[in-house]
Structure formats: C-alpha cells, structure tokens
Image (cartoon, grey):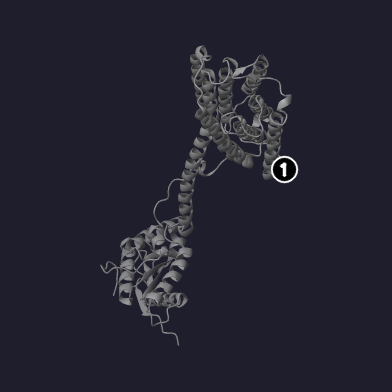
C-alpha cells in the first residue's frame, strides 16, 4: 500500500504529472514591451528602415575619416610605378563579385519584406556592379587570355570600367530619389506588384544593361575612342573618369541632404566615399595601370564592396540573436499562460480543466501498468451558511485557507489536489490503495479542522470542517474515470449523511 509520506518509489509520471507538480509555481513578470510591437515597427528591424541615431552617424563619420586619412597618405605617391601583379587583379575582381553579389542578394531579401522602391534600386545597383565586374574581368588583358576574352579590344576594359563607375552612383541617386521620409518610422510605401515579379524584372533589366555595355565594349570596340594608350590614361579617358567621379560626389551629396537617414543610408554614404577615393587614386590622380594609385584605388574598391556586406551580415546576426531572445521570452510567456489556464483563480490550485485531463491520463496509465488509482472528494461542511453569515469575501478567504491546508497534504509530486467546483476539492492519488487514500483523506480533514476557522452555524464543532469521500479502483475493477467520480461522490454524501466532518470510503464496485 502506498499512502501519504511513503518512501516507495512512485510510478513513472506522465507529462501532466510535471505540469501538476509545477502548476502553482510563481510566474515570471509580464512585460508588454517584450512581446508587442507598435504598428509598422517590425519593419525597423531592417537597416533599410532603422532610423540612424547620433552614435551611428559618428561611426559612419569615423569610417569616412579613416578612409580619407588613408587617401591623403597615398596621394603623394600615386604615380609611382609598381610591378605588374596579375594575381592582384584576380583577387580584386573575385572579391568584388563575391561581396557585391552577396550584398545584392541580402538587399533583395530585405526588399522582399519591405517592398520599397528605393531598396529595389539599391539592390539592382549592387547586382549591376556584380555582373559588370565579372564581364570586366573576362575581357581584361592578361587575366584569362593575353588580349582578354569576349573579343575585347584595347579600349574595352576602359569602357567597361567607365560604365561600371557611372552605373552605381546613378543607382544610389535613384535610391535616394525614391527614399521616403516615413521609411525611418518603419512605414514603407510598397510596390503594387508582387516582390518576386519586381525582383525578376530588375534582374532582367540589369542583365540587359550589362549585356548591352559588354557588346558596346567588345563588338563595338572599333568605334570606341582612345581612353588608354598602353598603360597610361589619355586626356579623354581622364575627362570621362572625372565625370564618373563627379557622379559619385553628386550621389553622396544628394544622399547626405536627403534626411532623415536610415542606418543603410549612412553606410551607403561610407561606400560612396570609398568609391570617390577609389576613382581618384586609380583613375584620376595616377598615370595609368599598375602604379601605386592604381593598386591603392582597387583596395578602396574592395573596401567599398566589403563595408555594406559586413554591416548586413552583422545586422542579420544581431537580429537573429534578437529573434532567439524574443522567442525564448515568448516561450516563457506561453508556459505562464498555460499554467494560468490550469489554475483556479481563487485558490491557486489546479482547476477543473486540469483535474479532468489529469484523471483521464492516470486512468489510462493505471490500466496500462495495472496499478490502483484512488480519488478523494472533499466538501466544506455548511459552506452556504458560512457565506450567509460572514459574507462572500470571508467565504473566499475561507476557501483560500482550506486550499493551502489541502495542498500541504500532497507530498508526492505525482498526487494532485484541485478545486473541483464551488466549495468542493479533489485529490487524485495514482498508485494508491484504499487504505492509503483514507489515510490521506483523514489527514486532510484534520488539517482543515486545525485551522479553527470560526463557523458559528457549523453543523459539527463550531469551526469550518470538511467531509470526504474516498473511492479506489484496481486493474481488475474496470478502471473508469466517471465511475471513480460517482463512487467518491457517493462516499462523500455518505460522510455528510453520517454527521459530517468525517471520511467515508469504499472501493469502486465491479462493473457487471
């Protein structure tokens, strides 16, 4: 026999056992700010819509200042001739294609959610640099073939370089033009078309522009003017490159005055600044290919390609970490809500919902493991008279004190005490025979009587007492939850009929 306080190991508990054992634990404090977000603020989880503060602006200015410092240090030596290193150009174009390609994918993915015209243009600009850099590399002399691939002529790579460095600042200008003031509030003016369709159309248009530029630089190379003679830039080439530089400067200025700024605005300005230093060193202030300015400018190009990508990757990691934290907090909140749904609001005991689930679960478990199951139903004697005499607030306080006393009787985690309804309470006692259940019911009766809650209209001893009915069923008794409740209820009625403040018990009758 297993009774209250027994040292015998209880049976294996089900998932509801754990819930029952923890149902009265205090819940974590509720914090609305953790689980809610004002309308539109979910968009601000992206750099494209996240407002930039003073700290972010200072960080961008520091990055521009460091780039400018390096530029000033290199300018006096920009025309110094350097050895030709083919591997350097291979590194340069590979880094640009990879960095700009990944950046384009990340920006397109943000556009898919935000559906901002401005962001679509910026993503297209990065896709343009990715594709045109790849075409530039294919036709660069000495990289894949002595004279380059795709039927390139002597001016082909120069023409592609100039188209390349005009296209991106134009894309940034378009981004700035379509950028709306309310995007910093996370409110996006979306495209009316589906995002997949807009992305596909953008990719097709960018690819067409790059193909057209490639055909102009290769098939039409005979019509191109002389931009470079040997390894030196001509006056015409210098003029066109200066135009590209001015386009970058105009894009930077336009974006700078187009306030308010988002996080992505600041770092696009840093990127454009690096482009200005790149063009100045590699094409304007130097003499031509393979001097110090040419090499340094291309390092600035790699820096420009890496900056926004690095920020986007950091952003993704940061927001993923934030998502994990929010998910964890939501899980805690859901567990708290689950416990709330299983608690009686007045007594903090398990409610009828948990009682029904727990009984059903342990009836099945007792059948499977062929173990006994006992049920105790308790009723506060003369509770209506108590309410009439002392008032409902006093009645509620009485039920709370009774609940605490009954809860203290349950010492095994597998046992459950619940408020069955009104002034009735119930114990579910898995793996407990009739004698053990009677012992627990008697301990509960004595615990309530020891509270000495004055009840002048009590039908028993002048204080609040309970009557308890105990029923127990074994594996051979045809275990059934409803029959167990009916039997325990009948015993409780018998205890009341016999004078109250007592325990009556009987096994569940075997079903014919």
Tell me the SS state at disc 1: loop
28 or 377: nearer the eye?
Answer: 28
The one of 92 and 445 positioned closer to us in this rendering: 92
The residue to which callout 1 is attached is 193
| Left or right: where 199 falls relative to 504 | right
Q: Quadrant of the N terminus?
A: bottom left
Task: Identify the residue at horizontal 49%, vertical 58% (top origin).
Answer: 341
Query: Residue 478's quadrant in the figure?
Result: bottom left
Query: Percent x, y for residue 194?
Result: 70, 44
Q: From this viewpoint, which residue is outermost toward the front?
A: 146
**Left or right position of 55 against 141:** left
Residue that protrudes farthest toward the left in the picture = 7
In the rendered image of this protein, does residue 349 appear above or below residue 332?
A: below
Q: Toward the viewer: 288 or 456?
A: 288
Q: Is residue 309 visible?
A: yes
Is 438 rendered above or below residue 273? below
Image coords of residue 422 (percent x, y): 47, 64
Residue farthest along the top direction in this orientation: 76
Which quadrant of the view contains residue 481?
A: bottom left
Q: Is residue 452 left or right of residue 157?
A: left
Q: The C terminus appears in which quarter of the rendering? A: bottom left
Q: From the viewer's perspective, tell me whether residue 240 is left or right of residue 479.
A: right
Between 485 and 283, the one lying in front of the other is 283
Q: Position of residue 456 (x, y in %)?
A: 38, 63
């Amino acid at each position: 026999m297993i009774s209250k306080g027994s040292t015998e190991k209880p049976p294996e508990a089900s998932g509801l056992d754990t819930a029952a054992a923890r149902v009265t634990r205090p819940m974590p404090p509720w914090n609305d700010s953790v689980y809610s977000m004002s309308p539109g603020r979910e968009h601000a989880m992206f750099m494209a819509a996240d407002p930039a503060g003073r700290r972010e602006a200072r960080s961008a200015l520091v990055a521009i200042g460091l780039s400018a410092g390096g530029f000033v240090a290199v300018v006096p030596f920009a025309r110094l001739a350097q050895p030709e290193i083919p591997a350097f150009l291979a590194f340069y174009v590979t880094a640009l294609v990879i960095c700009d390609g990944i950046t384009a994918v990340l920006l397109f993915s943000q556009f898919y959610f935000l559906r901002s015209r401005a962001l679509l243009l910026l993503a297209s600009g990065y896709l343009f640099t990715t594709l045109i850099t790849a075409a530039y590399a294919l036709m660069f002399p000495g990289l894949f073939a002595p004279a380059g691939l795709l039927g390139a002529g002597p001016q082909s790579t120069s023409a592609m370089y100039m188209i390349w460095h005009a296209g991106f600042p134009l894309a940034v200008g378009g981004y700035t033009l379509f950028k709306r003031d309310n995007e910093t509030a996370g409110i996006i003016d979306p495209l009316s078309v589906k995002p997949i369709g807009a992305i596909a159309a953008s990719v097709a248009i960018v690819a067409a522009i790059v193909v057209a530029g490639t055909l102009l630089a290769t098939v039409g190379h005979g019509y191109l003017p002389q931009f470079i003679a040997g390894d030196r830039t001509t006056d015409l080439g210098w003029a066109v490159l200066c135009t590209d530089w001015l386009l970058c400067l105009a894009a930077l200025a336009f974006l700078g005055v187009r306030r308010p700024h988002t996080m992505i605005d600041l770092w696009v300005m840093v990127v454009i600044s690096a482009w200005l230093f790149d063009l100045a060193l590699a094409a304007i202030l130097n003499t031509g290919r393979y001097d110090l300015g040419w090499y340094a400018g291309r390092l600035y190009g790699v820096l420009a390609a890496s900056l926004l990508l690095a920020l986007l990757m950091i952003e993704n990691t940061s927001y993923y970490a934030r998502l994990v934290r929010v998910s964890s907090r939501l899980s805690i909140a859901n567990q708290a809500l689950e416990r709330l749904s299983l608690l009686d609001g007045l007594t903090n005991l398990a409610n009828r919902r948990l009682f029904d689930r727990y009984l059903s679960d342990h009836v099945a478990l007792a059948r499977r493991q062929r173990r006994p199951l006992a049920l105790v139903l308790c009723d506060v004697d003369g509770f209506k008279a108590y309410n009439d005499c002392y008032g409902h607030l006093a009645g509620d306080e009485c039920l709370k004190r009774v609940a605490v006393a009954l809860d203290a009787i349950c010492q095994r985690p597998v046992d459950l005490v619940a408020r069955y309804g009104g002034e009735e309470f119930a114990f579910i006692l898995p793996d407990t025979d009739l004698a053990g259940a009677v012992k627990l019911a008697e301990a509960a009766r004595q615990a309530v009587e020891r509270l000495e809650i004055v009840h002048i209209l009590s039908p028993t001893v002048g204080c609040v007492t309970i009557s308890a009915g105990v029923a127990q069923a074994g594996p051979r008794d045809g275990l059934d939850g409803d029959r167990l409740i009916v039997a325990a209820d009948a015993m409780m009625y018998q205890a009341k009929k016999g004078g109250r403040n007592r325990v009556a018990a009987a096994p569940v009758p075997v079903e014919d």
